[in-house]
């Protein structure tokens, strides 16, 4: 039985190493998917109205897998839930490749929904990193795994073009098949590593240490009830959802905003890959700093700062002409940093507010709401750009970001994680 602090510390190091590796591989898959999604759907439909679906369903696909994933996590621990998410993404790549060959946009959208399970698994990994983390280091340990995604995610969008050229050169065929194959292979390898190396399971070990091994199994409905009755959980869920909405809404249409200002589609894919790579770098690269701030000052001040950064990002990106790639890049980097602050801060807040027995259901409910917010952002972003403009979309998203302030301004004080541990 692993119940002593030294044994727990050793196990936590092993957990962090395994999750660090899988986040790199999973980040590559997510980065490729984000880079090609909008371009793929626009090419199949010929309209900007539906292109937001690809991005929103990719990032919000957790809405499909979170319910069974929570049940699997409750029974088999983090290993089962994370492997299930990546396995769903592998199935999604098969569906998208089939849709490309059949030239069926509806099937491609369904495939992208399944591909979103990779995003779900990557987000859930941050919770796995917090299961055995001491309270005073919870934010930092969680942020290490968020940061690990930087390596894969920054390279992912640029890798999309390389995968396309390699596949076309070897096998020929329609555009974007090479990108989908690369995503499928990466997700399959990631699932295999999780099943082989994430042992003993961090969640099951945390329950064993806390004496909750016989606690009743919980569902998403239990997570909803916890959010209703626990103010800290409720604030964390709302902050995560609104931050996710803003990030997906702006990011989903940036590729088309850039493309519409360029004459060469091939050159557009390269520029989009670089700018989205910088954006994803902003999402993950600053996570360790944000985690330390959460540990020192608590989650709420970090969430306030994250909201302010999101508003600044919308201002910079929304006021940028399609040809001003430097200014768009700055806006997208700020967008990523703001999202990172909201994600790390809210995850630490939710995790610290519940016991190990309550974590999968509560964290799953939070990610479900995030997924629904992402889908809503994608559904709204396409028509707004189609009938108004990219600038108006950014104004709309800035207003959405500000909606979290009433939940934060009244309670900026309270114990920090370090004080909680003491």
Image (spheres, rainbow, N blue to C red):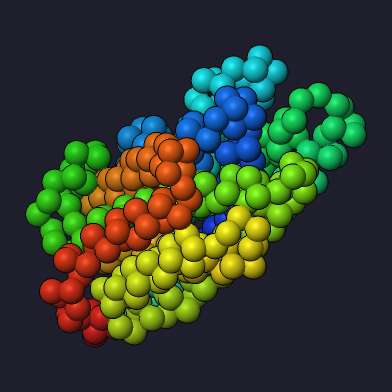
In the image, residue 224 lies at what x, y percent? 18, 45
Residue at the image point whose x is 52% and y is 46% from the top: 253
In the image, residue 235 lies at what x, y percent? 21, 61
In the image, residue 343 lies at what x, y percent? 39, 62
Foreground pick, 223 / 157: 157
**Number of numbered tags placed on the structure image:** 0
In the image, residue 241 lies at what x, y percent? 32, 52
Question: Does residue 418 appear to the left or right of 389 in the view shown?
Answer: left
Let me know if residue 198 appears in the view: yes
Task: Name the quadrant containing residue 400.
Answer: bottom left
Instruction: Find the residue positioned furthest to the top.
Output: 102
Instruction: Find the residue positioned furthest to the left.
Output: 229
Residue at the image point whose x is 13% and y is 46% from the top: 225
Residue at the image point whose x is 25% and y is 50% from the top: 362
Image quadrant for the N terminus? bottom left
Instruction: Find the residue positioned furthest to the right.
Output: 169
Task: Name the quadrant containing residue 308.
Answer: bottom left
Image quadrant for the C terminus? bottom left
Foreground pick, 46 / 52: 46
Residue at the image point whose x is 35% and y is 60% from the top: 398
Let me know if residue 7 appears in the view: no
């Amino acid at each position: 039985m692993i119940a002593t602090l030294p044994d727990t510390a050793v196990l936590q190091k092993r957990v962090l190493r395994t999750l660090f590796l899988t986040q790199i591989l999973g980040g590559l898959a997510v980065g490729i998917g984000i880079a090609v999604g909008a371009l793929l759907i626009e090419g199949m439909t010929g309209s900007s109205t539906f292109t937001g679906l690809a991005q929103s369903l990719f990032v919000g696909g957790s809405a499909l897998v979170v319910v069974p994933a929570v049940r699997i996590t409750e029974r088999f621990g983090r290993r089962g839930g994370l492997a299930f998410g990546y396995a769903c993404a592998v199935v999604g790549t098969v569906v998208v490749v089939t849709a490309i060959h059949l030239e069926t946009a509806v099937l491609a959208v369904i495939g992208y929904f399944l591909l979103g399970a990779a995003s779900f698994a990557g987000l859930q990994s941050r919770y796995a990193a917090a299961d055995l983390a001491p309270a005073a280091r919870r934010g930092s340990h969680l942020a290490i795994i968020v940061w690990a995604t930087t390596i894969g995610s920054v390279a992912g969008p640029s890798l999309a073009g390389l995968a396309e050229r390699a596949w076309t050169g070897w096998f020929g065929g329609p555009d974007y098949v090479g990108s989908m194959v690369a995503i499928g292979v990466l997700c399959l390898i990631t699932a295999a590593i999780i099943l082989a190396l994430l042992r003993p399971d961090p969640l099951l070990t945390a329950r064993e240490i806390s004496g909750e091994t016989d606690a009743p199994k919980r569902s998403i409905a239990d997570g909803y009830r916890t959010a209703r009755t626990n103010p800290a959980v409720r604030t964390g869920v709302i902050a995560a959802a609104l931050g996710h909405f803003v990030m997906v809404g702006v990011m989903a249409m940036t590729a088309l905003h850039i493309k519409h200002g360029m004459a060469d589609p091939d050159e557009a894919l390269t520029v989009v890959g670089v700018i989205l790579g910088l954006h994803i770098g902003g999402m993950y690269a600053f996570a360790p700093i944000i985690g330390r701030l959460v540990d020192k000052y608590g989650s709420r001040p970090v969430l306030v700062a994250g909201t302010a950064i999101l508003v600044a990002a919308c201002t910079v990106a929304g006021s940028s002409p399609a040809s001003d790639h430097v200014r768009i890049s700055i806006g997208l980097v700020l967008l990523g940093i703001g999202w990172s602050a909201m994600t790390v801060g809210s995850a630490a807040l939710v995790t610290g507010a519940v016991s190990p027995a309550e974590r999968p259901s509560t964290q799953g409910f939070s990610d479900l709401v995030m997924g629904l917010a992402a889908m809503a952002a994608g559904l709204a972003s396409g028509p707004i750009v189609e009938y108004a403009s990219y600038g108006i979309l950014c104004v709309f998203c800035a207003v959405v970001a500000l909606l979290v302030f009433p939940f934060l301004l009244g309670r900026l004080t309270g114990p920090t994680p370090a004080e909680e541990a003491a």
